């Protein structure tokens, strides 16, 4: 009896894992298509990515701020973010904040050479936040 319950739990876990993976791919593709459409329209850019810990675990509710200290976006429950804004927003620093983590700053535009920074390509960015030492 216990073996059957254990087997059912394992099968449920596998089914959930398969569902999560298939949902991720579908959601990512929808966001990618949306990003391309947004870039074609006027003067807007879209940046997509994920925020993770140093152990590569996704971080939810990381807040992104622009140069005016206004909230741009937040990461979702699995660490993904999407930013669609005017190009001017991406020329300035973008600040990432979350309680118990070290505040980080990213730059999509390199002002020293007047080019878009190749580190952050915009469609699959991975940003690592470090925990504060207590």
Image (spheres, rainbow, N blue to C red):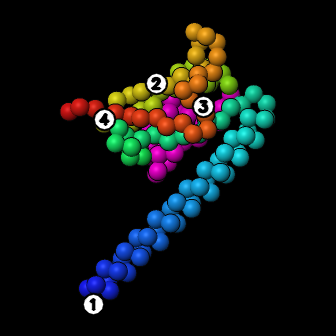
Q: Is residue 66 visible?
A: no
Label whose residue precedes the other's in the sequence (3 or 1): 1
Residue 131 x %, y %: 30, 35
Which residue has dot 2 on it? 105
Q: Quadrant of residue 53?
A: top left
Residue under the image location 57 percent in, 9 percent down? 112
Q: CA distance from mark 2 to mark 3?
A: 16 Å
Q: As drawn, is 15 to the left or to the right of 114?
A: left
Q: Is residue 39 above or below residue 17?
A: above
How many marks overall?
A: 4
Question: The C terminus is located in which quarter?
Answer: top left
Which residue has dot 1 on it? 1
Farthest residue, direction top: 112
Q: Is residue 75 magenta?
A: yes
Which residue has dot 3 on it? 121
Q: Is residue 120 above or below residue 37?
A: above
Which residue has dot 4 on it? 131
Q: Which tag is nearer the camera, tag 4 or tag 3?
A: 3
Q: Which tag is nearer the camera, tag 2 or tag 3?
A: 3
Question: The N terminus is located in which quarter?
Answer: bottom left
Image: magenta residue range: 60-86
Q: Nearer the viewer, residue 111 or 86?
A: 111
Indicate the secondary structure of the residue bearing disc 1. Answer: loop
Residue under the image location 71 percent in, 46 percent down? 33
Label whose residue precedes the other's in the sequence (1 or 2): 1
Q: Which mark is residue 45?
A: none
Q: Is residue 97 visible?
A: yes
Label whose residue precedes the other's in the sequence (4 or 3): 3
Q: CA distance from mark 4 to mark 3?
A: 25 Å
Q: As drawn, is 51 to the left or to the right of 9?
A: right
């Amino acid at each position: 009896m216990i073996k059957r319950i254990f087997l059912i739990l394992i099968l449920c876990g596998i089914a959930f894992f398969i569902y999560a993976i298939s949902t991720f791919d579908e959601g990512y593709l929808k966001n990618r298509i949306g990003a391309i459409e947004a870039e074609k329209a006027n003067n807007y850019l879209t940046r997509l990515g994920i925020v993770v810990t140093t152990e590569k675990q996704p971080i939810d509710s990381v807040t992104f701020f622009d140069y005016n200290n206004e909230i741009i976006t937040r990461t979702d429950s699995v660490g993904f973010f999407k930013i669609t804004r005017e190009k001017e927003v991406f020329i300035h620093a973008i600040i990432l904040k979350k309680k118990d983590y070290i505040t980080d700053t990213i730059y999509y535009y390199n002002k020293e050479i007047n080019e878009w920074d190749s580190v952050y390509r915009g469609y699959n960015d991975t940003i690592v936040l470090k925990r504060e030492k207590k």
